[in-house]
Image: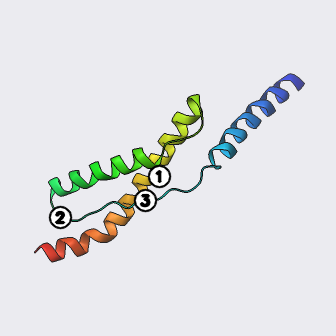
Amino acid sequence: MTIRLIALAATAAACLSSVAHAEVREPVTARVSIAGLNLASAEGRRTLDARIDRAAMRMCQSQMSGLRRIADEQRCRKEMHRDAEVRVAQLTPVKVASAR
């Protein structure tokens, strides 16, 4: 029983340390231009997605090594994409209305 508790505690500690380590990253921001894009069109959205992808790849380079680097970079890119989706959703009604 004691060995199981120690193993469980060690596993929990390992999980917490990776989470705590992941939170060390400095916040990053990037500006992505929407100039010349019609966000109401599929082509405009694809172009914007490509711009967001490039910005996320550029800004989310990690100084960590191994699997932690990969996980940190993926997490950063996912967060940047989520933030971008929220901002684009806020802009889209205005762009659609002005395109009509």
Relative image position of residue 84 (x, y in whole percent): 38, 59
| Amino acid beneath label 3 | Asp
Q: Is residue 35 above or below residue 76?
A: below
First of labels 1, 2 by sequence position: 2
Q: CA distance from mark 1 to mark 2?
A: 25 Å
Quadrant of the rendering where the N terminus is positioned: top right
- Rounded to the nearest angstrom, the CA distance separating label 2 from label 3 is 21 Å
Looking at the picture, tell me which residue is in the foreground, 83 or 37. 37
Q: Amino acid at mark 2?
A: Gly
Q: Which mark is residue 79?
A: 1
Does the image show residue 1?
Answer: no
Distance in Å between CA atoms under marks 3 and 1: 6 Å
Q: Quick one: 38 or 16, which is closer to the camera?
A: 38
- Judging by the rendered image, the residue that carries numbered circle 2 is 36
Label 2 packing within 10 angstroms: few (<14), some (14-19), many (20+) = few
Q: Residue at x 20, y 63 (%)?
A: 39
